[in-house]
Image (tube, helix red, strand yellow):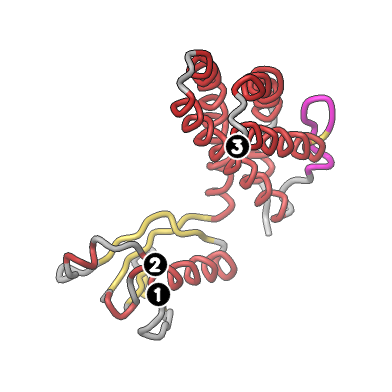
């Protein structure tokens, strides 16, 4: 399988039996470590690719079934900073969904409320993971980053507990407790986290290895 990165052929070597998804993960890892870049788009350059292969996921295909791929990359730091900046939109969307979720709970539309809440929690976990990446880089120190009445470290511990308690309330199918967590804990916490987005994104964007 030939691999082109930003229109330049790279010498990535994989055994034919390697799963395509695993190969992509390894290429992404090498690009981050060696070039400080991350894959942002993928194109399979094979007009003769079998239709049955096109229907499969990367984890269901071997590298010997693909002739050539083209990858576009972006600077890892700038990519991460952009995602953190976009997390403000995500947090706004989650906050706007709270009243809708509460409405579904009050209307006894449990399944709709639970599905929407699960999507919101998944989105929030992704945002927290972005902050974890920024910390791992050394681009920001959560112990020194103000958030709410304390530090970002304090906030993240409290925030994770809220998400855990929410998940537990969902598992126990307790709409009253879910409603209380949403209105009195999660909603104000979203505002505190949103206030840190610009600061963290700026620190990441200005970070150098």
Q: Tag 2 or tag 1, which sits nearer the N-term?
A: 1
Residue pointed to by mark 3: 171
Residue pointed to by mark 2: 59
Which of the labelled discs sits on residue 46, or is there none?
A: none
Q: Residues within 10 Å of mark 3 (few under 14, many from 20)?
A: few
The residue at the point 60 percent across, 42 percent down is 125
For residue 36, above or below residue 30: above
Q: Which residues are magenta?
A: 142-150
For residue 121, above or below residue 174: below
- Residue 68's image quarter? bottom left
The answer to whether the residues at label 1 and label 2 have Cβ atoms under 8 Å apart is yes
Q: Is residue 52 magenta?
A: no
Which secondary structure dominates the residues rendered in magenta?
loop
Residue 203 located left or right of residue 20: right
**Where in the figure is residue 46, as x and y percent of width and height?**
21, 69
Which sits in the foreground, 29 or 64? 64
Which sits in the foreground, 59 or 171? 171
Q: Residues within 10 Å of mark 1 (few under 14, many from 20)?
A: some
Q: Judging from the image, what secondary structure is the residue with disc 3 in?
A: helix
Q: Residues within 10 Å of mark 2 (few under 14, many from 20)?
A: few
Residue 152 located left or right of residue 74: right
Q: Judging from the image, what secondary structure is the residue with disc 1 in?
A: loop
Image quarter (top left, top right, bottom left or bottom right) of the N terminus: bottom left
C-alpha separation, residue under disc 1 versus residue under disc 2: 6 Å
For residue 109, above or below residue 128: above
- Residue 183's image quarter? top right
The residue at the point 80 percent across, 32 percent down is 146
C-alpha separation, residue under disc 1 versus residue under disc 3: 36 Å
Residue pointed to by mark 1: 19
Which sits in the foreground, 50 or 161? 161
C-alpha separation, residue under disc 2 versus residue under disc 3: 31 Å
Q: Tag 3 or tag 2, which sits nearer the N-term?
A: 2
């Amino acid at each position: 399988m030939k691999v082109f990165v930003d229109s330049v052929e790279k010498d990535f070597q994989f055994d034919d039996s390697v799963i395509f998804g695993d190969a992509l993960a390894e290429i992404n890892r090498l690009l981050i470590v060696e070039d400080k870049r991350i894959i942002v788009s993928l194109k399979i350059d094979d007009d003769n690719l079998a239709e049955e292969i096109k229907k499969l996921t990367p984890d269901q295909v071997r590298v010997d079934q693909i002739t050539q791929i083209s990858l576009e990359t972006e600077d890892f730091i700038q990519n991460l900073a952009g995602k953190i900046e976009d997390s403000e939109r995500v947090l706004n969307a989650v906050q706007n969904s709270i009243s809708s979720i509460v409405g579904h709970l009050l209307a006894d539309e449990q399944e709709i409320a639970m599905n929407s809440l699960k999507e919101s929690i998944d989105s929030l976990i992704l945002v927290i993971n972005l902050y974890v990446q920024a910390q791992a880089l050394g681009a920001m120190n959560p112990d020194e980053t103000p958030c709410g009445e304390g530090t970002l470290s304090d906030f993240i511990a409290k925030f994770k507990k809220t998400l855990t308690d929410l998940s537990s309330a969902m598992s126990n199918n307790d709409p009253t407790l879910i409603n209380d967590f949403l209105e009195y804990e999660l909603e104000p916490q979203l505002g505190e986290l949103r206030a840190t987005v610009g600061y963290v994104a700026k620190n990441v964007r200005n970070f150098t290895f």
